[in-house]
Amino acid sequence: MSDNQSGSSRRRFLQGTGVAAVSAGLAGCSGNGGSDTETDSGGSTPTDDQTPTENQQDESDIPRGGIFNLGMGTAPDTLNALASSSAYASIIYGQTYESGAAIDPVNFEMHPNVFTDWDYEVLDETGETDQPNTELYINVRDDELTWNDGTEFTMDDVLFTYNYYMDQVPGGYAASINPIVSIEEHDGDWDLVMTLNQPNSTFAYDQFGLPILPRHRWEDVDDYNTYAPQDTDFGGPVGLGPGVVTRYEPDTAVEVSYTDREGEYTLSNLSWREDVPGIIPGGPFVDAIRYRVYSSESALHQALFNGDIDSLYSSIRTSRIEDAQEDENLELIDGFDTGYGHYSFNLRRTPLDDQAFRQVLGFAFDDVYWNQQLSRGYEQEGDFVMPPGYTAVRPETGTDQELLTGPSTQAFAFRQSSPSVPNVEAIRSFLADGDIITGEGGTYAGQEYPGSLTGVTSTQSEQVHDYSFGPVESEVLVNADEEPDQEIRVNGQTITEINGSPLTMLLSPASESPQTAQMVEDWLGSLRQIGIPVDREVVSFNTRVTRAYGSEDFDMFSMGWVNLSPFATNTLYSLFHSDNADDHSVVETEGDDSNTDTLYNNAMGYGVGENSGADDLINSARTTLDPEERNDLSREAVERIYLDFPTMVVSYGVQKWPVNTSEWGGVIGNIPGPGSTYLGTQFLQVYQQE
C-alpha cells in the first residue's frame, strides 16, 4: 500500500490513547485533548537521534510468516474509506487501498506509485476561481496490477475513481476533490490529463493521494454513505493494496491477510524505496496483521504487558512508559508526532465570537502543570497549528527566536500571580480595558509580547463586546469550589443569561484519559476563579465527534489532530478555511445545505461570516507554485490562526511506540507517527525474528 493510504494524507477522527492521542491521515482527529486526523496532541518528539532507524537486512534474507498483533482501544466504525470518520478504521482499510503517488516518511518526498510519472502546465485561461487553470499530465502503471480480489486493474478504474469523487464529494476528501475540474484521456504522449481550477504546488500530495477505487465494485453505488464493504460477498474493501480483510468483528478483532490476496502485490518493490534510509523494499513479510480491540485503555496496555499483542496503535500511555522500559521484550520506538492536542471553540456563540475573550481562555491554561506534572515531560508546550517537526512552515523559521520557546510563541501563556494560581486581576483588566493581542508588540495582562514573527496581524483589531464584572449570579459559579468574588458581564449580561446556560466543555470520560480530565478540571477551575461560568460535559468519543463536527452543537471541546501535512497548505485549508465549515449564520430552511451533518473539519466556524479568518493567506499559499513563497505564506497563515485563537494548541506529544522486538524486527524509528501515520510503512517491513 502507499504510505499515503497508511493514513498519511487524510484526516480521520481518533480517540486518544493516553496523554497525547493520535489519529490517521496526514491530518485527522482523536479523542482526548489535543489530531488531517484528529487526536489529543501532535508534535515532534525530542529524540537524541533524529535519523531514521537503519535496517541492514536484505530482502532475500528476511524470514516470512507469522501474524503481527496490534491492539487498539477503540473499535473501527466502518470499512468504507469514503464514509469513515475513524483513524482506527483507516489503518485497516488502508491496507487494501493504493493511491497515485506515495509520500515517504523520511524525506517527505512524493514518489510514483500507481502513477508512474507526471508533469503540469499552468494555462493562460482563467477558471471559475479567477485563478489560471492547471493541467496535470499523468502516466498510469500498466505492468499487470491487480485488485486484491484478482480482477485486473485498468486505466479506466482511475478515470472512474476521480469522476466518482467529483460526483459524490465525500467530506473527508473535499479539500482535494473540489479543485478538480475534469479528468480524461490525453490525446498525446500522456495517459490522462487532469484539470484543476487553480495552480496547486502540492497536487501530488492532494489530488494524487486519494485512494483509487475499483469500478467493478463502486459503479453501482449511488450514494457512497450506503456502501458497506464488510457486508459484500468479498467481505471487505477491494483495492490495489497488499491486504484482504478476512475477519471483521469490530468490537473484538479484525484481520487483514496478505497471503489470501488474489494476484501478486508489486508496489513495495518500486525502486525509490531502496533509496529511502531505513526502508526495506519487498514486503509485506508477515502473513497477516491482526487488530485486537479492547474495551478500555487499561485493558489495552495490560494486553501489551501480558504479551497478548505485539504493539498498540500510536504511543504508549505516559504512566506506563517506565513499565515498558523495564520489560525485556519491549522496545520504545521514538518518533515525531504529526499533530497537536487542542481545545477548540465555537465561534458562532457569544462571547466565543470575540478573539479577545478567546485569548483570555489561553491565559487561564496552566501549561507548566500540564506539560511538566501531568504529562511528566512527555508533552511539549503547544503554540502553533503546525508541529515542531515541520519547521519549514513554522513561524520561527528565518527568525532569531528559538523553536517553541521564543517570546512570540508565548503570547497566551498562563498568567499567574503565583505558581499554578491565575492572575485574576490582570486577566479581568485585559478584558475590561478593551485589550486585544493583534500581533503588535506590547504588554498584555502583565506580560510583554514582542510582536508577531512574520509581521502578520490578527483579523480583529478591537474587541467585539464590552466586558465588565459584577455580582456572582450564575448557579455554576455560586456553587463553585473556587468561590469567585465577581462574574463577567458581556454587554451588561451574564453569559448564562445570553446563552441560557454556562459555557460547556465536552471531553472524554476520565477512565479513557485521566490526565486530560484532570487538566480540563484545573483549566475550568481557573476560568471560574476569573468569573467565567463554565462547566464540563463528559461524553463518548463518537458523541463528541458528532456534536462538534456534525451538528456543531458545542461551546468548547477537547480533541487532537495528527497526520498533518508537512507542506501545511492541505491541512490549513481543511481545518481552518471557511469552505470547510458549516455557516450557522445562514437562516435554516428546509433543504438549506449551508447547515449539514457532514463532518466538516473546521468545526469552529473559523472564517465564517463575521468570524476571524485566514482564508486569503491560505488561498494564496495553496495556489503558488513557488515552494519558498508557499512556505512564507503558510507561516503567515499559521501565525494569524495563532493570534485569532479559534483553537488553543495544548501540546505536542512525544511519541513512544512500544514494540515486542524480542519477536519482531524491521520497524523504523525517528520518523513521524511511527505507530500511527506510517503504520503502513511498518506493516510492509516488519518481520518475525528467527
Image: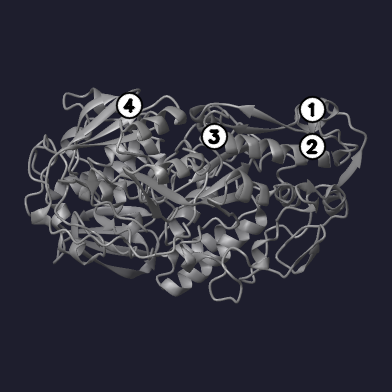
**Element at label 3:** loop
Counting from the top left corner in percent of width and height, residue 30 is at 48, 39
Q: Along the line of sight, which residue is nearer the eye, 616 or 299?
A: 299
Q: Residue at x 21, y 34 (%)?
A: 256
Is 285 left or right of 71, judged from the image as shown?
Answer: left
Identify the amino acid type marked 1: Val
- Tell me the tag on residue 513: 3
**Element at label 2:** helix
- Residue 598 in view of the camera: yes
At label 1, counting other C-alpha atoms closer than 10 Å, the crowd grade (few under 14, some 14-19, many 20 or more) is: some
Earlier in the chain: of badge 1 and badge 3, it is 1
Q: Along the line of sight, which residue is nearer the eye, 171 or 640?
A: 640
Q: Residue at x 27, y 49 (%)?
A: 682
For disc 2, the marked residue is 528
Identify the amino acid type marked 4: Thr
Camera-near label (3 vs 2) is 3
Is 266 left or right of 125, judged from the image as shown?
Answer: left
Give the Cα separation between the discs numbered 2 and 1: 9 Å
For disc 4, the marked residue is 226
- Residue 142 in view of the camera: no
Camera-near label (2 vs 4) is 2
Camera-near label (3 vs 4) is 3
